[in-house]
Every structure is written in C-alpha cells, then in structure tokens.
Image (cartoon, coloured by chain):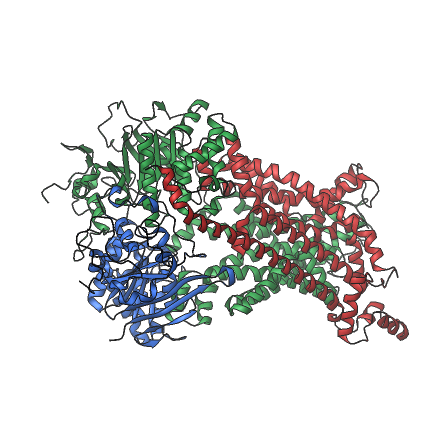
Chain colours: A green, B red, C blue
Amino acid sequence: MPGSGGAGRRVSDTLRNPLAVAALLAGTLVLGTALLGPVIWGEAAETNDFTSLDQPASAAHPFGTDKLGRDILARVLVAARLSIGLAVAATAIGMVLGVLVGAVASMSGRRLRRFLAMMIGIAVAFPGLLLALFFAVIFGVGPRGAVLALGFAMAPGFARLTQTLAASVTSQDYVSAARALGVSRVRILVRHVLPNLAEPLIVNGTVAAGSALLAFAGLSYLGLGVQPPAYDWGRMLSEGLNSIYTNPSAALGPALAIVVSGLAFNFAGEFAAQTVGGRARVHRKVPAHVPADAGPRLSTSSDDAPGTVLSVRDLTVRIPTADGLIRPVRGVDLDLAPGEAVGVLGESGSGKSLTALAISRLTHDPVRVDAQRLTFDGMDLRGRLGATERTRLGTSLSMVFQDPMSSLNPTMRAGDQLAEVATEHQGSSWRDARARAVERLRAVRMSAAERRSRQLPHELSGGMRQRVMIAMGLMGDPRLIIADEPTTALDVTVQQQVLEVIQSTRERTGAALLLISHDISVVSSICDRVLVMYAGRVVEDLPVADLERARHPYTRALVEAVPTMQTPRDERLSSIPGRPPDPAALPTGCPFAPRCPRADTTCTIEPPLVRYAAGSGAVACHHPVEETS
Amino acid sequence: MTATTDTHAAAPHLGTGARARNTWATRTWTRYVVRRLGVFALSLWMLVTFAFAMIHLIPGDPVRAALGVNASPELVAARRAELHLDEPLLSQYVRYLGGLVSGDWGVSLQSRLPVTQVIAERLPNTLLLAGLTFVVTLLIALPIGTGMAVLTQHGRHRLLELGYTGIAMVVSAVPEFLMGVVLVYVFAVRMEVLPIAGNAGPGSVILPVAALSLGSALALSRIVRVELLSVLGRDFVRTARAKRLRPRRVYLRHALPNALTATITLGGLLLSGLIASTVIVESIFAWPGLGPTMVSSIITKDYPLMQAIVLIYGAMVLSINLVVDMVLSVLDPRSTIREA
Amino acid sequence: MTAALDFRDVTVTYGTGAQAVRAVDGVSLQVPAGSVVGLVGESGSGKSTLARAAIGMAPLTGGSITASGRPLPRRGRRPVQMVFQDPVAALDPRMSVRASLTEALGVAGAVPRREREAEVMRLLELVHLDPGLAGRMPAALSGGQRQRVSVARAIAARPEVIIADEITSALDVSVQGAMLNLIRDLRAEMDLSMLFISHNLAVVCYVCDVVAVMYLGKIVEVGPTAQLVADPQHPYTRLLLSTAPRVGASLADSSLPPQVQDTEPADPHAPPTGCRFHPRCPQGPAVVAGREICAQQDPAPGARDRPHQAACWFPGGPVDLPSPRPRDPQPAEAT
C-alpha cells in the first residue's frame, strides 16, 4: 500500500467510525476549554454574588453557586486549564523518565539490563495511585508534590512499555542487519529503534494522560493535590460533596467535567491506535443476493457425476473488505472418486485453502460461499446443516491443517481431543472413547500411544502432533481426508513420515484425499491428479505424471521455478515476472495474462474456458503449450 | 510386519527423549517457582526499605514539618528521640526491621495509639470491601464478556457490539470515586434507600462495593470478550468446528479455558488496582477501613502510621501478584517456560 | 589460500546449567574465496546459530571465526554480511530503500558522499531491481523485491563473505527461482563468497559448489556438491537425499527400515550419546546388529580422515541394500 494514500484512506475510514468522531469532538471541546476557559469565564468565576450563596441549579447558574456565591459552571470551565495542565505535566514527567530508563535498560549490557528489568517489574506491580500516595509523602502535599508524585508513579509503566517495545524492535532482522553492518549502538537507537517506538508510545501517552487526569482529581479530592484558593475539578468535587444534600449539582458539575475529559483522552488514544494500526476499517455487509458472476463459467462439465465422494460445481467465495467485495475463489469445479487422491497446487493467495474450507463448511461470516452443487457422500452441504448432517460430517470428513501446534487445543490432553469425537457423534462413554483414541493413535504409528494420549500438545513434537490430527479423523469412518498444507510446518524427514501415515491411512480406510499444497514434490509424491489454481480459478487439471508436460504456461513455470534433485545445475530456473493479481482488481481476461509470455490481446479480453484434452486433463488457456516443445 | 512391532522397536529411544523433555519441563517449573518466590522476597525487602527510607527522603526536618513552626524545641526533640531520628542510619534501620518482626510498629504521633492496634481495627474492613468487590466483579464480568463474545463474533450484531462497547467504555472511564458520588446522589440522596456513609449494617456495604466494581467489571468484561474473540479466531477452534462439535462445547470446553490465562493476568492487575481505589472510595463513604487513615496520616504527617500503612498496602499487592502468578503457572505451564 | 570465512571448532551454548543447549558443537567449516558453500540441516540443527555467530549475534563459547584470515572486528565495518529469511522483518519499515542502502554504504566508508546516489542505483540494477524503486518504503515492495534489497544492502557493505539464511523459504514459489538465479548471476559477475543456508537440499545443491550437512549441532558430512549427491557417506545425508524434492518420485522410493521409520528428531536438551544420529539411523544399532559403537562413541574426532569428513563409524553405501558397487571398506578420497 503506498504510504500517503494508505494513511489518507485510513483517516477517512476512521472518520466513518462513530468512536472516532466522538473522539475528535470530545477532544476539541476539552482542549478548547482548557485553552480559552480562563480567558472567557475567568472573571465570572471569581465574581461573588452574596445574594445567592450555595444555591441549587437555576437558569442564571446552571450548576448553582458555591458557598461564596460564585457560579459553578464558570468555575468548572476555568478549572479545565489547571486540571488538564497538571495531568499533562505529570504524564510528560512520567513519559520522559520512563522512556529514558526503558531505553537505557534495553541498550545496556546483559547484567544491567536484567537488573533494570527486574526493578521495573517490581515497580510496575504496584498500582499507580498507591505509588502516587507514596511519593506524595515525600514530595509533600500540594500541586507540585502531586504532579511529581503522579509523574514518578507513571514512570515504571512507561519504562516497561519502552523496554518491551524496544526489545521487540531490536530482535527484528533489520536491527541485526544494521549491527552486522557495523552501525553504532547510538545510531541504531536513533535511526531504527526510536522511530519505530514513537507511535505506540504516543498512543499510550494519550491514554495515560486520561488516567492521570482522573488520578489527579482523586488526589485533589483527598486534599493531597491542589490547595485553596486555587481549584481544580477534584477539589471542587470534594467541596460539592460536602453540600450534596442541599446542592447536588455542585458536585455533579465537576464530576461531569472529569468524566467527559477522561473519555476524550481515552477516545483520542483509541482513535490514534486505530489509525496507526489501520484497524478502523469498517466491514461492509455482503448483499444477500449478489448478481451472478459476470464472467462466463470456466467449465463446460456441468454433467452429473455419479459415484463421486465429493462433487463441487461453480464454487464461489466472496469476502467483503475495505477495498470492496473480493472473490478469492471463482467458480471452482471438482469431482473426487472414492479413494482418489487429488492435489490442489497453488501459490499463496490462489484461493486453494479457502476452497478447502468452503468445501468443508468451515468458513464463517462475513465470508459467503455459493455453489451450484456441493455434495459430499451423497449429502448436499449447501444451506443449513442439521444434526444428522453434522454427525455424518463429523465422522466421515476428516481435516488436517497446516500448523499442528496451533490446530490442537493447548489446554486439552491429546487423547481427549480425539475421544470427544466419539462421545459427541457416536454416543460413546468417555472410557470407551479414550480407549478408542489410544487405539487410533497406534494406528498412526504413534509410539507409546497410551502415555502420549495423556499429554498436552506442547509436550509432543511437531510430527507427533500431526499424527494426532490425522488420528482425529480416524475416530469415525473417513470417506474423505482434506489436508491443507499438512507438512509445510515440518522438517523434511518428518514430512516424509507424515505423508507415509496419510498414505497408509488412505490405503486402510479407502478414503479419498484432497491435498492442498504449494509444494509440487509433496503433491506429486502422494496424489494421482493435480488441480492447479491461480487467482481463484482452476487453470489446469492433469495427472501427476504429466506435470512436467503441463500445458498451461503457469503450471509449466511453476514446475520449472523450483529446483529439484533432477534440475541440471547449469540450467537457469524459470521465473515468472510480476506478481499474482490483486483480488480486488482482477484483470478482465485471463488472470495470468499480464505475466504470461504467450499472452496476446485475446487473453487480456476474454477469460479462457476449460478445454478437455484428448487423453485426460483439462486446461483453461487460449494458447496452451503444445507437446512438441 | 505389523504396525505394533514397529512401535515397539522404536519405543525405547523415543521413550528416553520424551522423558527427558518431561523432567526438563518439571525442572523448568520448579526453577520458575523458586525464582518467583525469590522475586517476592526481594520485593518485600525493598518495600520495607522504602517504607523505612520514606521519612528520610522528606526534605528538611520531618518532625518540625509535622509539628508545625509553633511547636516548642523540647517537643520536637522529644519526638525526634521517640522516632530514634538522632541515631546513626544503620542502627535505625536495624531497629526498624527488628520492630517489624517483633510486632512493635511504633506509636501514632496523632492518636498516641500503637500502630498495630489501629491497623488491626481498620484492616478487616478494607479486606471485606476488596474481597466482596473482587467476587462481584468476576460474577458480572465473566458472563457478560462470554455472552458478548459469542454474540458479536465474526462481526455479527454490530449494533449490539457498538452499544455494549460504548456503554462499557463510558462506565469504565468513570473513576471509582466519581461512581461513588453518583451512586450516593442517586441511591442515598434522591431515593434514600441506602445509607450514605459509614459501616452500619449490611446495607452500607452495597454502595462502596458497587462504586468499586461497576467500572472494573465492565472493563474486565471487555477484556474477556476480546480475549475470547481472539481465541475463537485461533486454529484449534477451527479444528473443534471441523470435528462438528456442538457450539456450546466449542465455546465452553475449547475457547473459554484458553481465554482464562489472559483474564486471570489482567484480573490480578485489576485486583491490585482495586486495592488502591479503595483508598478513595473508603474516604467518600467514610468506610472505617485503612484508606481514610492513610490519607489523614499523610496530611498530618503521622510517620509511623504512614509507614505501616504503606507496608500493608504494598504487601497486599505483592501477595496478589504472587498468587496470580502461581495460579497461572499451574493452569498454563507454558507460561513458566516462556518466562524462563 | 586463506578462506573467506573460516569456522574453527566453533561452539555456541545457550542457557546455563541443566537448561544449557549446545546449539553448535565443535563445528569447523571453510568458505573458500569465490565459492558458494551450502549448509543444510533441519530446524534445531544449529545452522542459523552458526550464521548468527559469524555476524557477532551469538557469543562463542569455544573456537574461533576468521574472515580472510583476520578475526572478526568488534566495531566498524564488518567483513561478514547476512541476508535473512523473513522479507518483512529484514527492512526497517520506516526507512526507504535508498535510506537503507545509503546507511550500508556509509558504514562501508569506501564511497564518497556525493557518489552514493549513483552507487545506490548501481546496486539496485545489480540485483535486477528498477532504480525507480529507490524512493519506495518497504511496505510498498513485494516479498521478492524486499529480499533483493536485502541482498543489495549486504553487497553495499563490501563484505568478504555473505551469509544467506533461508532466503527463499518465505517467498512464493514463482519468485524463488528468480531469487536463486540472482544468487548465481551475482556469483558469476562479482566473484562472490557465500555461505548459503537452507533446509532444502535441492535448493542447496542447485546453488552451491560445496555442501555441508548439519545434524544436532554437528557437521556430519562435507563434500563437493556432485560427489555428495552421487556418493553420500553419512546415512543422514542419504536420508536427506531420499526425502529431497523430486518431481514424480512416489513415497515408496524412499521408505526406511521399519525400526527407524517413525523416529522423532532428538531433543537438543538431551542429545543421544555417541553418534547423535544413531537412534534414527537406518544403518545404525537399531537396525544392524553389532553396531553398538555408534551408541557409545562419538565418530566426530576421526571425521577428517574419512571421505567427505563423514562423522560416521560406517561411512559409505548402505548395508543390506542392493548397492551399485561392492562396498569398499576404505574408499579413496574424492573418487
């Protein structure tokens, strides 16, 4: 995203957010009052009207008068400057002190760093108000003492924040690179670390100023802050509370002021955080009925496919984003015969994983899935799934995901995560279900299955975790295994083991396999057939054995872009210029045309239809590579 | 060749590796506990030292400052002697530590009562208030946070979400003492259903507890909601859904336990924050706890009392943090590994 | 001839006491000037730690590292530069391409200030990037482009040797080929010395002249690429070769003896005794009778005298499997 345009849009997006608008309004109001209050209402606030002492709210005095007959509203408005000024001063002291200590801690040597970190940790454990009371003892009662006390009390928090942020920045590779270049420590701090800390520090500073305001009001209320005849909101509140029976508005006026300004600071912090983090994006609702896809259907094979375990026609996935409605999957057709192993090959962003999730009905709002047909094992998966469908899916469709660590519940024993399938869908008792889980773990050749089943996922290795995932699908009677990059997170030798387990599972159960992967060698080692996806479409469907004779220029390039053990060392690898199209701005014709060496004007205008070849396989290309080359 | 023999053949080697991993984890946990207790002891010692140092950090003559310019030099000298301020610093420190251990915490300069007696009278009321508040906070925050997370996940019910976050933000931005003022005004002044101040019967505890818990309960419920939402977006929840479990089981068995770690961490911070807030709320409601005593001791410069109260509050906060960390290390052993 | 980068008996230990892990354990490896040496191994093998040691990011607990015969300096221009795996973290998000490259040129010191702009353009062209990208921030670049900028930054510092740590792992498949082509072009154009680290043996073999195989902190085999592929000496190398990417090879081509088929990588906190690979070794004591020595004695000390410096008591072809030639008890060095 280009810098300025992105920021501009972030601001305009934020403005559509009601929180942000509230933040801007409240912030302007509070700051304006603090700046102008004493100038405009200064005189009114000091005018004693001895005819109306301690009066409740009236038209002349909306919040009544105090015991010297002064208008409370005017005094509240005038007190804004002192109240906010003191809070900001305390925050400034806290921030400067904290950032200094934090920066020193993060830049110093190991021992000093650990010592300072421990000291900061101990200091942070104490609530700010308690620290402020402690410092108030030392600095004495009064506004100066209170500002110092609050500032000192806020420092540990900022020190901790600075230290954590700096640690995360200095662990980044670009700081390592700068060190390797020989850039000096100070220069690294100034050029690399501090600029990357500025944003979060400012956000936190704003929020902290808000709480400083509240804390200061609290201190003044207790009589430890501003002393008469000066007054801030806290002191006015404590005076008002004394006469709460006769004139409640005297307390409510300053109370309201404190809440409104506290909120203004909070809102401003939230607003800053959202603008900085780009989180303020509004989700637009997907229209319930989207007009049919403008482009022609890619496939001509809309014939019914009997004897399939999975049959998909015109699968489309739509997601609303800030850039408008995108369609990461556009009209995918797919048939799997029982026991067949089909690979889906594609780069990141090709829509292959979403296709797998959409087929298995695991997408959720705001993602919308539509299909002309989505049949699994004779069951229509479109529309709402009832209890029967749920049970059948739970026992006959097995899923294996990419990252076995994050895909297992970290707080639940491995065996129980298997067993709950049986208790949920097969009405087993926990005892039986656990025994079955151990047996299934043995089936995936998990060593010491009994003991492993009682362990938590983090106690298992990556390969074992993936075996647990595979065994989970074996609790029922799987007809289809959908595996989404099942070995990508694993080491090569373990990858081999896991693929072998998947293979032997298939052989034993007769389940079909849909393997999603970016890795040609993984797909070709275990699958019979490959679907190649690009920009949400299947561009080629071919037997694994024909991969090196692929007809789509993209498949060709993909096969030749990655070296294998057979790649001659003196041959250049093929490379594909450019990058995959932005899903929000897809070209009208063939999505691969801008990167394709064979593309002509037809390709840029007309999306290619899938053409079935004489033998087996299909290709969606106007100019497929012919076998002669 | 069957799968079973394969496993047996490989088992011995694997067994040792895994056992090593386990004992290593246990050792890491023990190391963590020992280290954590060490930090606790160190913090406690630092707290005591700071409480001792407080009186020496005050600019000028603390006794003169406490008694005012009109006090006779004899009185000042007597008080200095009573506080042992004329002795060398080290012997004062040793005497102070000894006094703490033996239960001689000094005598209040104002009331002339033993400090331990004042604290024994006041502390139970503060503990009652803090304990009740904590329980009420949890009882409000957990159901609301969980319910809101489930209702508003994946951007559903956007109006409800907006209303809830709006209200929660506003209410939790109201500091406890202001909440107290508002509650006093509504329930004690206007409706006259609850006592305005003091500790006279069970009814008088309602307003202080409400003032303390409302804001923090809503703040905590927001945290519970955000944590739960982030857990609901994690891969293992997708796995649970792939197993086609009932939604109730997905939420309560898979998502909620994983959101608790962060909730307890932040809940602990909230609780120690509550301890500080009781000081002001007790002052508003004239609750006979330690809070008003602390404030008056600061204003009247009643050093022995002040030192003792700072110690008590600090020790409470440190103990809460210790308990939270211990609970976490049992619930989520991985946190100890991350720490170490 | 002195090597561009020379690791001698390098040991790196993390943690202390019971938690100590020897991530790198007595590793000796040379990167000769003008050649690309590959280092292949699984996660946890210590290959990245070795790289970090060479740029001073991991303190040595033993041994020494020299660049062109000189010890690594503690300050100023460093002779070893590194290109990292993650293209997102590799560039400061708040510095333009120009600023990043200029910083590197500034430290190198050899380029006068007013010639730096021209030098930035030359560097960008060298890594096949449009010089018009100089003003861009990293966020506006693709992963492949960022990796190219990282390479340019490393070259800008005029190092004796560049370490490339998994530089293609985080890239999309269609971009990886171009990146590897770039490395080969640079090598041809500027006589680059490089240590190329990857978990992917096929990638390493494609780019490198010499390949070193690392397992659990130790180098188990080193040899010229063609020889290592044709005649691997260490069983672990053979395992890696059989699992390396290969189009059209079915799983059955690489199945292992059942005794070691499902073994897990060892725990680095408690490495196995003797040869660290022995519990998983298809020719080790778990499979072949009478090889207890593997579990008892470390084969590393005598490795220098074995072909490919194999840290293995029984180097050479596998036993009990049809071998292309009769097993030679003492094969000649570099057949």
Give the camera-side residue of A249 and A350: A350
Q: Is residue C32 left or right of residue A4?
A: left
Task: Using the rendered view, name the quadrant where residue C251 is placed.
Answer: top left
Provide residue A527's location: percent of width, then percent of height.
26, 37
Q: Is residue B259 above or below residue C319?
A: above
Q: Is residue C49 left or right of residue A547?
A: right
Report whether residue A455 is seen. Answer: yes
Give the camera-side residue of C263 and A546: C263
Residue for point 31% across, 52% down: C171
Residue for point 51% across, 54% down: B24
Q: Is residue A286 above or below residue C29?
A: above
Report whether residue A61 is seen. Answer: no
Provide residue C167's location: percent of width, then percent of height.
31, 57
Q: Is residue A105 left or right of residue C285?
A: right
Q: Is residue B323 above or below residue B192?
A: below
Provide residue B8's location: percent of width, then percent of height.
40, 42
Provide residue A239's location: percent of width, then percent of height.
78, 53
Task: Using the rendered view, name the quadrant where residue C223 is placed.
Answer: bottom left
Give the residue furthest to the left.
Answer: A628
Quadrant occupied by the N terminus of chain B: top left
Give the residue furthest to the front.
Answer: C290
State how many labels appear. 0
Give the camera-side residue of A525 and A174: A525
Q: Is residue B120 left or right of residue B139?
A: right
Q: Is residue C331 above or below residue B57?
A: above
